[in-house]
Amino acid sequence: MDADLVPLIELAGDLRTESARMMPRIGPSARSSLALVLRAMNSYYSNKIEGQHTYPADLEAALHNNFSPDAETKRRQELAIAHMEVEHHLEELTKSVPWAEHFDRPWIAGIHRQLYDRLDPASRVILDADGNARGEMEPGELRKGRVIVGSHLAPEPADLDELLGHFKFRYGETGWSESRKLVIAGASLHRLSWIHPFPDGNGRVTRLQNHLLLHHMGLTEGLWSPMRGLARRQGEYYAALREADLPRRHDADGRGSLSSSGLAKFIGFWLDTCLDQVKFMSQTLSLDTMHIRYSSLALQFLHDYGKGPVLHHRSKLRPDLLGKALHRLFVEGRLERGEFKSMLDTSDRTASRVVSTLLDQRLVASPSRTGHLEPGFPLFSFRFLFPGLWPEAESVIAPPLESTGK
């Protein structure tokens, strides 16, 4: 792959640069609040790739422990929540985990175990191509049978230990440059998918392992993930995986049994997808336009999203001031309640009612009844604040408001 490495290293350098430019556009506290809802988006898109996506409204309901009475919908809700919990838990660990361990069997098996241990036994039943049960999966245990995924016949179960050992040996070396690590992250996404170590859940696990590698490198901070891009380019994603599955074509096509040029094309696709996601998110978080979007959201909020004024007609509150207060909260990530209310330039009674209503709608959050305020990102707000980021979530309707003037 050496002849193909130069353009990949250049793409990796561009990705690192764009990621570094994006990070200062949102404060650490606000970043943490936004990362929470973006994990929901990641789980939605990763499950969508598997053909098991959950409607965003169902996903948000599950976030508030409101599960569907329909068994299949509930199963998918639980799978999405499990994905989010594992992503969050392992993001907190991954920066302290040495590079080599991210390619080690215990780490990879641990992702699988943590994901499926959170599900009940009925969700761990393995189905064949006809939908018939053929056994129950043991979380974290390698597969014991042959598997065909599309046109890919996965390696023999007896070879898995050796293949996973070589996987760590090949990609877990220390001393790589940061750009070379990005190339390796792209390569490992395919190679781990090709090994297909588990009887089920391989796609989710390999994408989580890939996401955590990027987090380990300090490139995401929860603000973007390849999962959204891979889902939105799913046809290309599968085609690139298939091309990298091909056997070596000739003596110049690498030294292993698989095509080196096919792997290089997959890595290029993956890097391009990541770069596209960073640029899109960077534009979405642009401070030049976020204040306008918050002003629009404030205006909509004060008119109950087209249903009529929220405040009594004698209450004076300028939507531009509410928009500025919400935008500053977004940038700072945290404001004392009194400071936020003073920015509204209205009576304390009116400001308190507005804060109470914002809390009810989860547009702001607080650790207590009188504590400081933090930004909130309910899914209905995405169409105002982050248009196009999660189009499927833009159909979520804002909950009805009670007039604060009563």
Image (cartoon, rainbow, N blue to C red):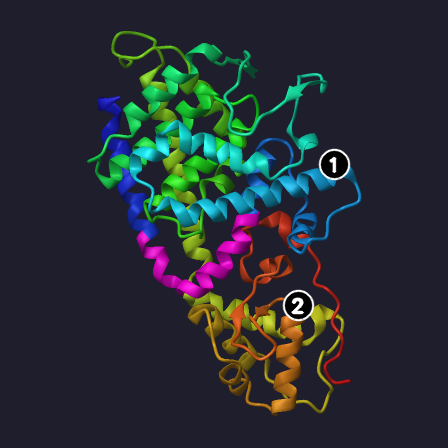
As rendered, which of 374 and 346 lies closer to the eye? 374
- Residue 260: give x, y in percent of width and height: 32, 18
Q: What residue is at 25 percent from the left and 28 percent from the top?
A: 5
Residue lying farthest top? 250
Tell which circle, 2 or 1, labels the residue nearer the N-terminal end.
1
Q: Residue at x 72, y 70 (%)?
A: 306
Above or below: residue 110 compared with residue 368? above
Residue 239 x, y percent position in the rendering:
48, 23
Which image quarter holds the C terminus? bottom right
| Residue in front for this viewpoint, 230 or 208 | 208
Q: Position of residue 63 (x, y in %)?
A: 64, 53
Residue type at numbered disc 1 = Glu
Q: Spatial distance from mark 2 to mark 1, Cα to Cα?
A: 28 Å
Residue bearing mark 2: 361
Q: Amino acid at mark 2?
A: Gln
In the picture of the structure, the residue carrying the numbered disc 1 is 72
Tell me where the magenta segment starts and ends, as one range.
20-40
The x, y position of residue 341, in whole percent, is 55, 84
In this rendering, the label closer to the viewer, 2 or 1: 1
* Front position in the image: 181 or 325: 181
Taking 41 as reference, is 269 above or below it? above
Q: Quadrant of the N terminus?
A: top left
Horizontal relation, residue 388 to residue 28: left or right? right
User: Left or right of 12: which side holds 378?
Assistant: right
SS at mark 2 in the image = loop
